[in-house]
Image (cartoon, rainbow, N blue to C red):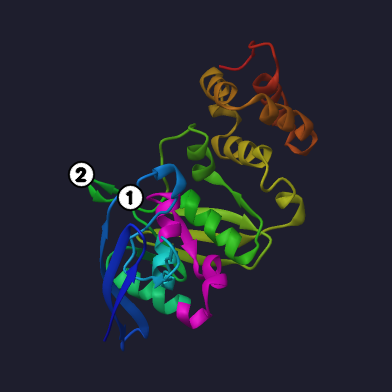
């Protein structure tokens, strides 16, 4: 253990430092006392004592904080807020793969993060009434796409749910991909990645692809004024223009429905 004093014209810092053998980095404990300068405008200094770890310089009022990999990972999750989902790949610039895996495992053991699938970690949302909530599947899907550089196209009931055309959240979500087919277990839910043709994937990552898949799930006979009104209200002008541009890629039976969605006139023959 080492003891030290660092003094300036108007302040004194006293502390102790030693190395934690388990994690091989210095732990710092300190106290700080200061008296205001006679002319505050001529002395600009700050001190950040929010972290346990730090490097102290004997220069006037100067301190640099160093964080562990765990601290940095957790800070990123905190920055995105509860419900954020990430993978090891999102943190590789912070250290080796082994160090990242170990840090994530520790955060899971400490209850700060939740492992929701192979290589998937979440800063879970918590409800006062319901406790820890299920993962947000949209964020899980986004994390998977980012990790593996995949193009994904949501289909079926989940596509309709994302567009508020259905309240049903399926236990099994089918997603088209340009990658290999496989399943991802997320709690009690299953995400099935299904390799698809280039033609079916050509609108992936566009609002058009999501709308076309939702309408395909509902079926022509179940699409009326209510569904068209919901889409007209929530889609932005740019999104409507994109749907108009992609109209030739939609099945013929959808054309009148899509025109009613993006047209300036709110009239429709449906319903």
Residue 110, image quadrant: bottom left
Picture layout, residue 56 above or below residue 168: below
Q: Can you identify the residue that label 1 sits on?
A: 125
C-alpha span from label 1 to label 2: 10 Å
Q: Provide residue 14's location: percent of width, then percent of height.
A: 26, 70
Magenta region, residue range = 75-99
The residue shown at (69%, 28%) is 238
Give me the disc on residue 128. Answer: 2
Q: Which of the image's four quarters has the N terminus?
A: bottom left
Picture layout, residue 148 above or below residue 270: below
Helix, strand or loop for disc 1: loop
Looking at the picture, tell me which residue is in the foreground, 29 or 193: 29
Please rate how many residues cluster around mark 2, counting C-alpha atoms within 10 Å: few if below 14, some from 14 to 19, many from 20. Answer: few
Image side of residue 253 versus residue 141, left or right: right
In magenta segment, residue 181: no
Q: Provide residue 35's location: percent of width, then percent of height.
A: 28, 52
In magenta segment, residue 83: yes
Residue found at the far front of this picture: 38
Q: Main secondary structure of the magenta part?
A: helix
The residue shown at (69%, 61%) is 178
- Whether label 1 touches label 2, CB < 8 Å: no
Looking at the picture, tell me which residue is in the foreground, 76 or 17: 17
Q: Provide residue 251's location: percent of width, then percent of height.
A: 73, 36
Residue 271, image quadrant: top right
Residue found at the far bottom of this picture: 21
Helix, strand or loop for disc 2: loop
The residue shown at (75%, 49%) is 202
């Amino acid at each position: 253990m080492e003891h030290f004093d660092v003094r300036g014209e108007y302040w004194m810092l006293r502390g102790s430092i030693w190395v934690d053998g388990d994690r091989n980095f210095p732990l710092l404990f300190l106290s700080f006392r200061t008296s205001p300068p006679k002319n505050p405008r001529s002395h600009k200094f700050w001190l950040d004592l929010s972290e346990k770890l730090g490097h102290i310089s004997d220069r006037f009022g100067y301190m640099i904080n160093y964080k562990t990999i765990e601290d940095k990972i957790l800070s990123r999750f905190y920055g995105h807020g509860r419900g954020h989902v990430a993978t090891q790949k999102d943190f590789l610039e912070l250290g080796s793969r082994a160090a990242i895996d170990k840090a994530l495992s520790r955060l899971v053991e400490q209850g700060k993060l939740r492992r929701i699938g192979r290589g998937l970690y979440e800063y879970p949302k918590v409800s006062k009434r319901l406790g820890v909530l299920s993962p947000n599947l949209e964020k899980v899907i986004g994390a998977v796409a980012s990790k593996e550089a995949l193009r994904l196209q949501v289909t079926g009931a989940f596509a309709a749910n994302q567009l508020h055309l259905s309240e049903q959240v399926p236990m099994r979500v089918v997603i088209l991909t340009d990658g290999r087919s496989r399943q991802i277990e997320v709690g009690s839910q299953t995400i099935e990645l299904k390799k698809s043709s280039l033609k079916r994937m050509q609108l992936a990552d566009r609002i058009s692809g999501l709308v076309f898949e939702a309408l395909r799930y509902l079926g022509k006979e179940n699409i009326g004024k209510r569904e068209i009104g919901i889409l007209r209200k929530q889609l932005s002008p740019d999104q409507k223009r994109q749907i108009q541009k992609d109209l030739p890629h939609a099945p013929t039976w959808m054309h009148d429905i899509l025109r009613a969605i993006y047209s300036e006139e709110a009239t429709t023959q449906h319903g």
